[in-house]
Amino acid sequence: MKAPAFRRIEPDARRLALIEACARVLARLGAAGASVRAIAVEAGVSPGLVGHYFSGIEALVAATYAHVEERVNEAIDRAVEAAGPAPRARLDAFVTASFAPGIADPQLLATWIAFWSLVTARPAIAAQHDEQYSGSRARLEALLGACGIPAERQRRDAIAVSALVDGLWLELCLSPGCFTAEEAGAIARRFLDTLTSPDR
Amino acid sequence: MKAPAFRRIEPDARRLALIEACARVLARLGAAGASVRAIAVEAGVSPGLVGHYFSGIEALVAATYAHVEERVNEAIDRAVEAAGPAPRARLDAFVTASFAPGIADPQLLATWIAFWSLVTARPAIAAQHDEQYSGSRARLEALLGACGIPAERQRRDAIAVSALVDGLWLELCLSPGCFTAEEAGAIARRFLDTLTSPDR
DNA sequence: TCTGTTGTTGTACGATCGTCCAACAAGCAA
DNA sequence: TTGCTTGTTGGACGATCGTACAACAACAGA
């Protein structure tokens, strides 16, 4: 009576395990270290299994980006809901959560970099990026609309807020010592003041 | 009488030639394609020469980033100078030039991505990034100061403008079809309006 | 218990990677 | 012209990459 050499698990669960292993490897070793073998070791499976669930390493990276971005969005949404019903408080919670520990994190940046490096060359991945970006912007437009931003300004302002938050997030990940998450949040909230001010 | 098999050139010129070849390869093949051999072919030299001028491929990428960023800064500075003496016009020229063709360019993004992927893991490269970022921010602070931004607000506002411009620039490179360079410039100039408005 | 399905293994393969270094030759000084 | 310095070559080297595939075994159903 010996222990089984491996366990079969549901395909969706295995896919998820590989995605999460990929995210951990990206966080630990960076974009350059995310090889099929390293990911397989992290997931506790053999290298061949990666090819069984994903058409290639690029597809796994793209799926990992989609999964990590979804988790980030969930965390931000929870912060927005926790802020209560006041539209402006919800908008503030959105930007504050974007710089919270675990979100503005150098280890997360590696996943974004690995994905960005594929966007230019692979049309399918560029389409995925466009889709995720427009989804993120739509949620921001809804928050802005609730604050009284007129419909014809929502697109432009959502692009602006998104760019400001992303730029601050990126710099916070690249040089964590340059300015703090609190400063980033204060800068972003001050920008929201100018957008929601009634005299514009 | 036969043509020489190769030409000796001044070390600084050879270094520059390798850096420019690296930039072209990054633009054409992306971060993943920037191998020693591909760069050597692009420069018209043998692969061994790369190791003779740079301690490794990472050092060449770092030098390439520094060089490309300097060229970008020069182009922006030229635009600022061409705007004349009016401080606000110079500030507008700064952001407008940041989205000009050849600056907001997907081909340039590959150089930034290749560099960013090294920042987290390599302390020396992180230090280089901090230095280049603070230099870029200092020039922005000077432009803001000339517009009447008080000294105690210059650091915060420069961080904000830099983040907004970088965020717009990044998205413009990743999805060129999502919004235009003109829209990005308009968004950034509108933000400058709020900063330079006398009532704040 | 036995059988069939298929998730999983482990390796082999060719390609490509970064680095290294002995040999070569271009160009300057004598 | 000759000799010396050293920029440059080009291949060898081991490591690692992504992918493919035949064989194996876990597990459900009979």
Image (cartoon, coloured by chain):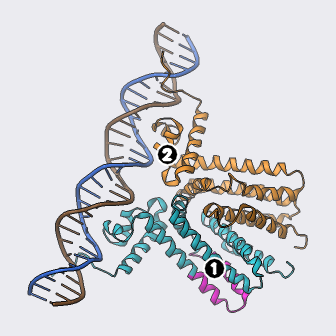
Chain colours: A cyan, B orange, C blue, D brown
Question: Is residue A184 shown in magenta?
Answer: no
Mark 2 is on which residue type? Gly
The answer to whether tags 1 and 2 share a subunit is no
Give the structural element (helix, strand or loop) at label 1. helix
Residue at left 77%, top 55%?
A: B139
Can you say which quadrant of the picture contains the C terminus of chain B? bottom right
B198 displayed left or right of A78: right
Q: Which of the 4 quarters of the picture holds residue A106?
A: bottom right
The mark found on residue A97 in the picture is 1
A80 displayed left or right of C21: right
- Disc 1 crowd rating (10 Å Cα; few below 14, some 14-19, many 20+) is many
Q: Which of the 4 quarters of the picture holds residue C30?
A: top right
With respect to residue B111, does A171 lie above or below?
Answer: below
With respect to residue B123, does A48 lie above or below?
Answer: below
Q: Is residue B146 visible?
A: no
The mark found on residue A67 in the picture is none
Question: Is residue A85 shown in magenta?
Answer: yes
Residue at left 47%, top 71%?
A: A64
With respect to residue B57, does A112 lie above or below?
Answer: below
Question: Which one is in front, B185 or B178?
Answer: B178
**Residue ID for mark 2:** B56
Q: Where's residue B175, x and y in %?
A: 62, 64
A152 displayed left or right of A142: right
Question: Which one is in front, B84 or A134?
Answer: A134
Residue at left 55%, top 55%?
A: B114
Which residue range is magenta in the image? A74-102
Give the structural element (helix, strand or loop) at label 2. loop
Q: Label 2: chain?
A: B
